């Protein structure tokens, strides 16, 4: 139970970091942009306030907890974690992997991400500067990982534009 409490605490700190990234960095930056309307900002706020709730579902929670907080009773299980990570990506459109269509041929087609999910994704990446390491910003993470990500041109352009208007992300 102690390890489960540690994992719950981590999730809550992560969610708080996502909210902090939104309220302190991205939201104020978007307010200066004319293209962002009240409805879109409200939609993003709702997403941010419900961020990663699926991690509390048992088919994600148990595998994540055992993977990140293994014990003698519950060993780290890579296969269970991979299944939970897959479920998490499929349940949460703020992950770029959600927007990848895998054709029967095996070809991966990146679909355009709506801007509200891009904003949530950026706040997700940014949250680690509050939870793990102050240098783990969305900007730094993106620069290190952008060549591994399968993104549509439009999605990539939007990410890069948002990172320019909110460089502290």
Image (cartoon, rainbow, N blue to C red):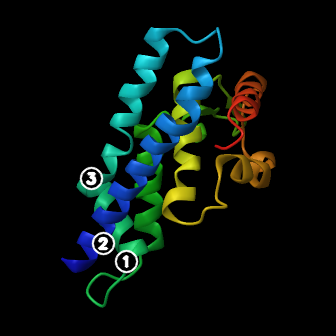
Residue 56 is tagged as: 3
Q: Percent x, y for residue 60? A: 33, 56
Image quadrant in which you'd find residue 154: top right
Q: Quadrant of residue 63?
A: bottom left
In the displayed structure image, the side of residue 40 where residue 8 appears, left or right? left
Q: Is residue 141 above or below residue 92?
A: below
Side of 59 where 111 appears, left or right: right
Residue 57 image offset from top left, x and y in percent: 25, 51
Mark 1 Cα-neighbour bin, 10 Å: few <14, some 14–19, many ≥20: some
Which residue is disc 1 drawn over?
A: 69
Name the residue nearer the viewer: 104 or 29.
29
Above or below residue 70? Residue 64 is above
Query: Tag 2, which secondary structure?
Result: helix
**Disc 2/disc 1 C-alpha distance (Å):** 8 Å
Residue 59 in view of the camera: yes
Q: Residue at x 47, y 50 (%)?
A: 86
- x 40%, y 27%: residue: 45
> Is residue 132 rendered to the left or right of residue 154?
left
Q: Disc 1 on helix, strand or loop?
A: loop
Q: Nearer the viewer, residue 58 or 13?
A: 13
The answer to whether any part of residue 114 appears in the image is no
Which residue is the extreme one toward the left? 1
- Pair 2/1: label in front: 2
Residue at figure coordinates x 48%, y 71% from the top left: 78
Q: Is residue 19 above or below residue 76?
A: above
Question: Disc 3 on helix, strand or loop?
Answer: helix
Looking at the picture, how far across and down is residue 130, in whole percent?
Answer: 51, 58
Q: Earlier in the sequence, mark 1 or mark 3?
A: 3
Classify 10 Å Cα crowding around label 3: few (below 14), some (14-19), many (20 and above). Answer: few
Mark 2 crowdedness (10 Å alpha carbons): few <14, some 14-19, many ≥20: some
Q: Are marks 1 and 3 in contact (CB under 8 Å)?
A: no
The residue under label 2 is 6
């Amino acid at each position: 139970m102690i390890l489960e409490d540690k994992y719950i605490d981590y999730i809550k700190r992560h969610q708080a970091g996502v909210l902090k990234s939104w309220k302190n960095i991205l939201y104020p930056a978007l307010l200066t942009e004319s293209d962002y309307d009240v409805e879109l900002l409200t939609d993003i706020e709702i997403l941010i306030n419900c961020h990663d709730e699926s991690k509390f579902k048992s088919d994600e929670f148990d595998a994540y907890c055992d993977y990140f907080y293994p014990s003698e009773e519950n060993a780290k299980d890579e296969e269970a974690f991979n299944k939970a990570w897959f479920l998490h990506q499929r349940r949460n459109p703020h992950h770029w992997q959600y927007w990848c269509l895998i054709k029967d041929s095996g070809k991966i087609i990146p679909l355009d991400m709506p801007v509200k999910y891009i904003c949530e994704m950026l706040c997700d990446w940014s949250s680690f500067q509050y939870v793990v390491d102050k240098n783990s910003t969305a900007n730094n993470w993106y620069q290190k990982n952008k060549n591994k990500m399968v993104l549509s041109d439009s999605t990539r352009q939007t990410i890069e534009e948002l990172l320019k208007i909110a460089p502290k992300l």
